[in-house]
Amino acid sequence: TQSIQMPMAMQYRVLRDNYRTYSVVRRSPIHGCGLYAARRLEKDSMVVEYMGERIRDILTDYRERMYDARGIGCYMFRIDDDYIIDATMKANQARFMNHSCEPNCYTRIVNPDGVKRIIYFASRVVLEGEELTVDYKMPIEDVKIPCYCGTRSCRGSMN
Ligand SMILES: [Zn+2]
């Protein structure tokens, strides 16, 4: 089991070896399928890396149009100005983490091994069986995507 006292590189190696045992995908009352804690997760421990294809920023518009034309739901997560993780075709279970206005995970871009990576961390102790959620922090837009997180502080929409 990992400890937050471990250096980031060591925490990341533990994550890579063990993340499949930390969470499981199941139907969610929030939306579609969600990600659930498969064991107790400690506060500020790494839960899962958002994995996919690492693509350059200039490719994202093209890919979004291609997925849209084929009716494929698009899953992209920006790392920085230059790179994006595209989890639409190649992904791990991190893609299934739903949005909540009162989340129990947070996102950090970390560089544990010379590569910038998107990692979800637990923001508190999470017990086995709880749904794992994160604030998507979507930009505010006129066309609202409704939120069904069901928490007391729900903002009503994800954007
Ligand atoms: Zn909400």
Image (cartoon, rainbow, N blue to C red):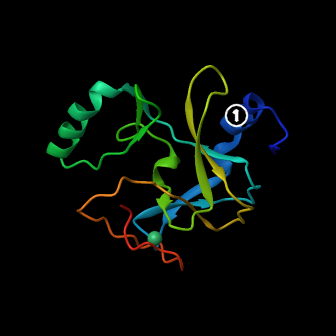
Q: Is residue 57 above or below residue 127?
A: above
The location of residue 150, given as percent across then percent down, is 49, 77
The quadrant holding residue 62 is top left
Left or right of 44: which side holds 55?
left
Left or right of 75: which side holds 8?
right
Residue shown at 37%/68% (left/top)?
157
| Residue closest to the eye, 64 or 94 | 64
The residue furthest right is 5
The quadrant holding residue 129 is bottom right
Q: Is residue 33 above or below residue 114?
A: below
The residue furthest top is 114
The location of residue 107, given as percent across then percent down, is 57, 47
Q: Quarter of the image for the C terminus: give it.
A: bottom left
The location of residue 4, given as percent across then percent down, is 80, 43
Q: How many marks?
A: 1
Please name the residue that numbered disc 1 is placed on.
12
Q: Is residue 56 above or below residue 93?
A: above
Identify the element where label 1 is drawn.
helix
The location of residue 149, given as percent across then percent down, is 47, 72
Q: Please tell me how crowded label 1 is: few (under 14), some (14-19), or many (20+) other residues with Cα within 10 Å.
A: many
| Residue closest to the eye, 80 or 117 | 80
Residue shown at 34%/57% (left/top)?
140
Residue shown at 39%/74% (left/top)?
156
Q: Quarter of the image for the N terminus: give it.
A: top right
**Of the residues shown, which amino acid type is indicated by label 1?**
Tyr
Mark 1 Cβ and ligand 1 under 8 Å apart: no
| Residue closest to the eye, 108 or 32 | 108
The residue furthest bottom is 152
Residue shown at 60%/52% (left/top)?
106
